[in-house]
Amino acid sequence: ILNVEQSPQSLHVQEGDSTNFTCSFPSSNFYALHWYRWETAKSPEALFVMTLNGDEKKKGRISATLNTKEGYSYLYIKGSQPEDSATYLCACSGSARQLTFGSGTQLTVLP
Amino acid sequence: EAGVTQFPSHSVIEKGQTVTLRCDPISGHDNLYWYRRVMGKEIKFLLHFVKESKQDESGMPNNRFLAERTGGTYSTLKVQPAELEDSGVYFCASSQGTRIGEKLFFGSGTQLSVL
């Protein structure tokens, strides 16, 4: 059973600031790391899926890195905008293929 | 292309009543998953269908929950009788395959409130 931890639980930043948050997971029985962006009452939107140690992915102002040996992933947002406000969810899959989610980081970008 | 759709978006029922949630996956996706988020906690896995077969139902909390996927297309999740602790957001997701690193596409969820 995977245990996925995310920090911080919530975060307020000013428009234009860059920010990052952490997802940690057990490095054993790891297959893939998923990042989702979720706004309440909408579908969680898949941002990245990473599988290999050292993976780095980028989508616009958002990027993510993966360290499977020490069991963590960082999500970075450069130049935060109000529309980036959302809950960012991290999830891991092991051999069972089901996703184990963290509790999320709720980001609020203040104009 | 339509995404994963769920119906209803909201449901308010009384304890002891029955509720049925529906999920239509992305066309052509053989894999369908149910997840739920209760009491503001983590989203948790309920079960996984491959076509019409239950591949993994290890997350189903008890026998008050029944999931079906007749014909391997849409799926229903029935809660009977509903209890207060069943309140939460029920998500459905689908994927084409199950290879490592495959993306799951989620619906917007059904917000269930049991009073």
Image (tube, rainbow, N blue to C red):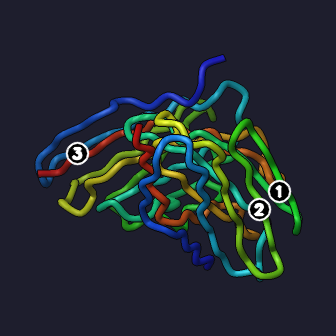
Q: Residues within 10 Å of mark 3 (few under 14, many from 20)?
A: some
Q: Which mark is residue A32?
A: 2
Instruction: Choose mark 3 or mark 2, whichever is in front.
Output: 2
Q: CA distance from mark 1 to mark 3?
A: 37 Å
Q: Residues within 10 Å of mark 2 (few under 14, many from 20)?
A: many
In contact (CB < 8 Å): disc 1 and disc 2: yes
Secondary element at image label 1: loop
Q: Residue at x 67, y 24 (%)?
A: B27
Query: If the image is split into quadrants, where does the N terminus of chain B sit?
Result: top right
Instruction: Tell me which amino acid carries mark 1.
Output: Ile
Q: Mark 1 or mark 3: which comes first in sequence?
A: 3
Residue beneath disc 3: B18
Q: Chain of mark 2?
A: A
Examine the rendered structure and indicate whether residue B5 appears above or below residue B1.
below
Q: Chain of mark 1?
A: B
Examine the rendered structure and indicate whether residue A71 appears above or below residue A91.
below
Secondary element at image label 2: strand
Q: Which mark is residue B100?
A: 1
Residue A68: name its quadrant: bottom right
Q: Residue at x 38, y 64 (%)?
A: B41
Q: Nearer the viewer, residue B97 or B64?
A: B97
